[in-house]
Amino acid sequence: MITDIKKIEDLSLNAWPSHQMEVYDGWILRFSYLYTHRTNCVEQIGASILTLEEKTEYCEQMYTRWGTPSIFKISPVTDPALDAFLQERGYHIEHDIYVMTADLTYTTLPDIDASGLSGLHVTVMPKVNDAWINALFALKKTDNDIHRRIVPSMYAAIPKDEIAMYIENEAGEIIATGLGILDRDYVGVYAIHVHENYRRRGLARYIVASLLKAGYDRGASHAYLQVVSSNAPAKALYRSLGFQIAYRCWFRVNGKETGL
């Protein structure tokens, strides 16, 4: 089980590069001006030699230099001593997520229900483009100038094959997005966003089911995604599509809440 978790954690790092990254004694320091927790945190990726105190102090100095709080990602493959050490140091849990996985076979692939697409247009691309990224900003209400500048380069740095999707309304406005990242025998599901005026029409279900089918057609036999642990509607949707909770991760933050 730990081997499978380590593999998915590696796939996640491949799928979502940060603006800047530094490797330090078995840890990777990721920095993206607090765009997301995942792209702005410390993650354990290998064995360590230095003490937790020495390493944590170094990370805190680096994130102070970058002008953001120190954030550490804790997963089942993280040394348990690190989580306890951070808690004692005053780090609080700010963001709690589940990683969900599904096996992809011809008989388990979910049906693709297009009944909610009346009057809408679907576009599938081999890579995200400017229209997709700008729509993502609009759907997430991203108005931070730095984020709008650096995020396109982060998507451009994804080293793996992609399946990018968006749905337009009758006026040509993109009202839903989705992204599949292909890596080894997995397809990772990312960036599922639907405009609030078009929810409860099955668009998220359609996008995820379509990404799973496209990934399966290109050789994926498994899928994974991440969901905020408190997001009950999203968890219910993903369960109905064949996903099950595989493990939990959380982020420990030093200082005031980031608001991510």
Image (tube, rainbow, N blue to C red):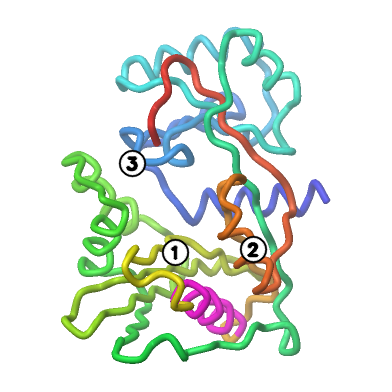
Vertical comparison of 254 with 249: above or below: above
Question: Looking at the picture, which amino acid does disc 2 mark?
Answer: Ala
- Say which residue appears at 20% left-offset and 39% top-offset: 146
Closest to the observer: 14 or 192? 192
| Residue 212 forms part of the magenta stretch | yes
- Say which residue appears at 32% left-offset and 16% top-offset: 65
The reply to whether callout 3 and callout 2 are in contact (CB within 8 Å) is: no
* Residue 17 percent coordinates (x, y): 42, 48
Residue 166: give its label.
Answer: none
Horizontally, residue 154 falls left or right of residue 94, namely left
Q: Nearer the viewer, mark 3 or mark 2?
A: 2
| Residue 87 forms part of the magenta stretch | no
Q: Is the magenta stretch mostly helix, strand or loop?
A: helix
- Say which residue appears at 39% left-offset and 87% top-offset: 117
Residue at the disc numbered 3: 19
N-term mark: 1 or 2? 1
Residue at the disc numbered 2: 236
Closest to the observer: 116 or 146? 116
Question: Looking at the picture, which amino acid does disc 1 mark?
Answer: Ile
Secondary structure state at the residue bearing disc 3: loop
Question: Looking at the picture, which amino acid does disc 3 mark?
Answer: His
Q: In which quarter of the image is residue 105?
A: bottom right
Q: How crowded is mark 1: few (under 14 residues within 10 Å), some or many (20 or more)?
A: some
Residue at the disc numbered 1: 192
* Residue 230 percent coordinates (x, y): 59, 45
Secondary structure state at the residue bearing disc 1: strand
Q: Give the range drawn in magenta.
A: 203-216
Vertical comparison of 161 with 99: above or below: below
N-term mark: 3 or 1? 3
